[in-house]
Image (cartoon, rainbow, N blue to C red):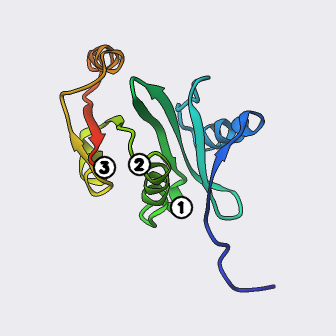
Amino acid sequence: MDDQQTPRSVQRLDTAQRALLQKFYRHHGSKMRITQQAEAWVIREQSIIAGLCLAPVAEGYWLTGLFTAPSFRQQGAALQLINHIQAVYPDAPIWLFCHPDLHDFYTRAGFKQTQQLPEALKSRLDRYQQHKTLIAMHAIK
């Protein structure tokens, strides 16, 4: 058996494979879901170690559901996944909502806080903020 580490690969899941990301979320007790219109992206070593959803909105995308398996956190997987989707969609704005504790992580990933949101996201953020504190951010690349 080879002692070399399995290389990480980023993959967009096709429709038939989307259940793999949902299973990954459930396996880790995450309440995250994949919406029908969202693209599902994962990073794998031997199996999925992180995933996210990217839903079209306005002339850009809304990033949701970023989750890394606990044993792979602080190892760059989430950042690699974000950098990959930013490279795939270099000219499209990408928005997200995050808990204040994640602000610094997303800032390092190239996002900044914003009040300028497409109307569909603004109304969603207003609804969400009735129950929790969230920060709106967008990619600055």
Name the residue that disc number 1 marks: 71
Position in image of residue 14 (x %, y %): 71, 39
Position in image of residue 60 (x %, y %): 40, 32
Q: Which of marks 1 and 3 is nearer the N terminus?
A: 1
Q: Quadrant of residue 117?
A: top left
SS at mark 3 in the image: helix
Label for residue 2? none
Position in image of residue 139 (x %, y %): 31, 44
The structure residue drawn at horizontal position 57% and vertical position 24%, both measured from the top left corner, is 35
- Distance from label 2 to label 1 (Cα)? 30 Å
The structure residue drawn at horizontal position 41% and vertical position 48%, both measured from the top left corner, is 90
Q: Residues within 10 Å of mark 1 (few under 14, many from 20)?
A: few
The structure residue drawn at horizontal position 24% and vertical position 52%, both measured from the top left corner, is 104
Q: In which quarter of the image is residue 134?
A: top left
Name the residue that disc number 2 marks: 90
Q: Which of marks 2 and 3 is nearer the N terminus?
A: 2
Name the residue that disc number 3 marks: 106
> In the image shown, does 140 or 22 lie closer to the viewer?
140
> In the image shown, does 133 or 13 lie closer to the viewer?
13
Residue type of the residue flagged with mark 2: Pro
Residue type of the residue flagged with mark 1: Ser
